[in-house]
Image (spheres, grey):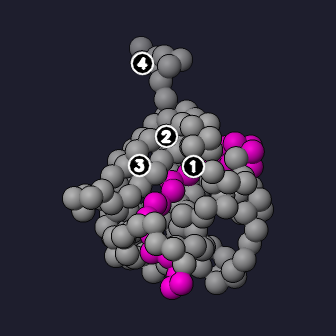
Amino acid sequence: MGKSRSRSSHIPKKVTFFLDECLPYPIADALKSFGYPIISWYEEFKGQQGIKEPYLIQYLGAKEYTWITKDDEAKKEHESEIRTAGISVIWIRGLEREKGKPKKNNIRIKDVHRILTDKLDILETEISNSNRSLYYMLWIDTTGKPVRKKICLETFFNTHT
């Protein structure tokens, strides 16, 4: 007699991380070379830039990608698209700004790489085992340690806009 599966059993879903255009695509290339399930905008779109967020979010939902971004506009303007697409989102906080713009942070590109190297395994596990979209913020704390915080989307949009 075979084993029966309970209704509550959950089959983990495949997770692919999508590194947004606002982050340097070589980070995804490096992580992918070490086996992380990640693709950059550069690889996915053959270097084409400037895809507007509503279309990008819809595309990511259709592909079931998890979006890694630092895009402040997405935080401010695209809550409904993110919800409709059903994507999980990881926001990187604290990336250096362009020269002449105010600095709100201290992390560099290599810190983004370090954060993702440190946190992608646990994020992949949590997202693959969830039956809903998840949202996170990642940053470097004052001691230099990478930090992962799971957030509620409503809280995120109400407190970070």
Instruction: Measuring from the top left, give residue 109's x and y in whole percent.
Output: 40, 76
Q: Which label lies toward us, 1 or 2?
A: 1
Three-letter amino acid code at the position of disc 2: Ile
Where 158 sits versus 25, above or below? above
Where 131 sits versus 8, above or below? below
Q: Which label lies toward us, 1 or 3?
A: 1
How far separated are the C-alphas under marks 4 and 1?
48 Å
Nearer-the-camera pick, 86 or 151? 151
Q: Quadrant of residue 104?
A: bottom left
Instruction: Measuring from the top left, give residue 16's x and y in whole percent.
Output: 52, 57
Residue 70 in sight: yes
Q: Which label lies toward us, 4 or 1?
A: 1
- Image point (36%, 70%), residue name: 106
Instruction: Measuring from the top left, give residue 56's x and y in whole percent.
Output: 71, 63
Mark 4, residue position: 3
Q: Which circle marks residue 160 in the picture?
A: 1
Mark 2, residue position: 151
Boundaries of the magenta span:
80-100
Q: Which label lies toward us, 2 or 3?
A: 2
